[in-house]
Image: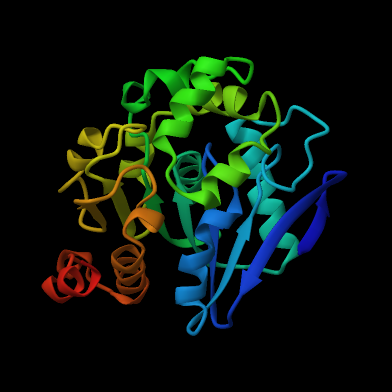
Amino acid sequence: MSAVVISGGLIHYEAFGRGEPVVFIHGWLGSWRYWMRTMEALAPDYRTYALDLWGFGDSDKSKDRYSVADYTSLIYDFMDQLGIVNASLVGHSLGAILGLHIATQEPSPISRLAAVSLPVTARAVNRRLRDFSSSSVRTKMFWWRHIAHKEVQQEVQKAADNAIRMSVKSALEVNAQTLVEQAQQPTLIVYGEKDSVIDPEPARMLNGRRPSLRPIGLDASRHFPMLDEANKFNRLLKDFLETDDLTDLALKEEWKRRTR
């Protein structure tokens, strides 16, 4: 376990591999842990980092600092403390919004962005998540039915009482579609075609918005493509990190045969 102290609070993170840096940011349901398989897959060629945001996993929960602005500052400070000057960033749901915020800042420490299960509009977010209450047994049971992976089940229970509710409220105020169009970095949008947490339709509609933007759906994936179709997701992400022309980026037939 690795940790740094930022703004008086401990931030837990893990790092694998060596090479150009890739920073992973988790979303509302879970922690750094669901990135582990992807980090291991990239580790032979990249230095991969994943942190627990305030209020999640094993990071500090002593203060209610759960807004998009709080988390954006946290990621900047995290990268600064670890000496990460320029990196590719991979964010999931809330993490995808944070990645877009950082990508559109001047100057930005992000060279490319992969946004996974991005809530392009507020209405794309499932009502149960928008109305999330840590005290609601019915809400908790709803999410348990949607989480099939132990990497998420074990970690979602660690979230601070207000972390999900407050971060959802802050994120819903963000116009993600505008940020997608403003970002200049090569951007991959990955969505699960069967996602019932974030409606994938608005992500599909981003196709063609700019040359350096590529939305791609994974047919058998729900909210966690990196776990639902791990091999396919990892191959796609590695291709994205290595390609100079996103128009050539696509799911290849040989991936489909190998991962069935």
Res. 26 in view: no
**Quarter of the figure with the C terminus:** bottom left
Look at the picture and state if 102 lies above or below 248.
Answer: above
Give the mark count.
Answer: 0
Res. 257 in view: yes
State the residue lying farthest toward the right. 8
Q: Nearer the viewer, residue 45 or 71?
A: 45
Task: Report the residue at 51% width, 74% height from top.
Answer: 40
Task: Report the residue at 64% width, 36% height from top.
Answer: 157
Q: Nearer the viewer, residue 70 or 9?
A: 9
Task: Report the residue at 32% width, 21% height from top.
Answer: 123
Answer with the quarter of the image where residue 196 lies. top left
Residue 220: x percent and y percent?
A: 23, 51
Answer with the quarter of the image where residue 236 lies. bottom left
As drawn, is 5 to the left or to the right of 78? Answer: right
State the residue lying farthest toward the left. 253
Residue 105: x percent and y percent?
A: 52, 47
As drawn, is 33 to the left or to the right of 208? Answer: right
Residue 152: x percent and y percent?
A: 53, 46
Task: Report the residue at 80% width, 30% height from top.
Answer: 63
Q: Nearer the viewer, residue 86 or 67?
A: 67
Look at the picture and state if 244 lies above or below 136.
Answer: below
As drawn, is 34 to the left or to the right of 260? Answer: right
Look at the picture and state if 140 lies above or below 252.
Answer: above
**Quarter of the figure with the N terminus:** bottom right
Residue 88: x percent and y percent?
A: 48, 64
Q: Nearer the viewer, residue 136 or 66?
A: 136
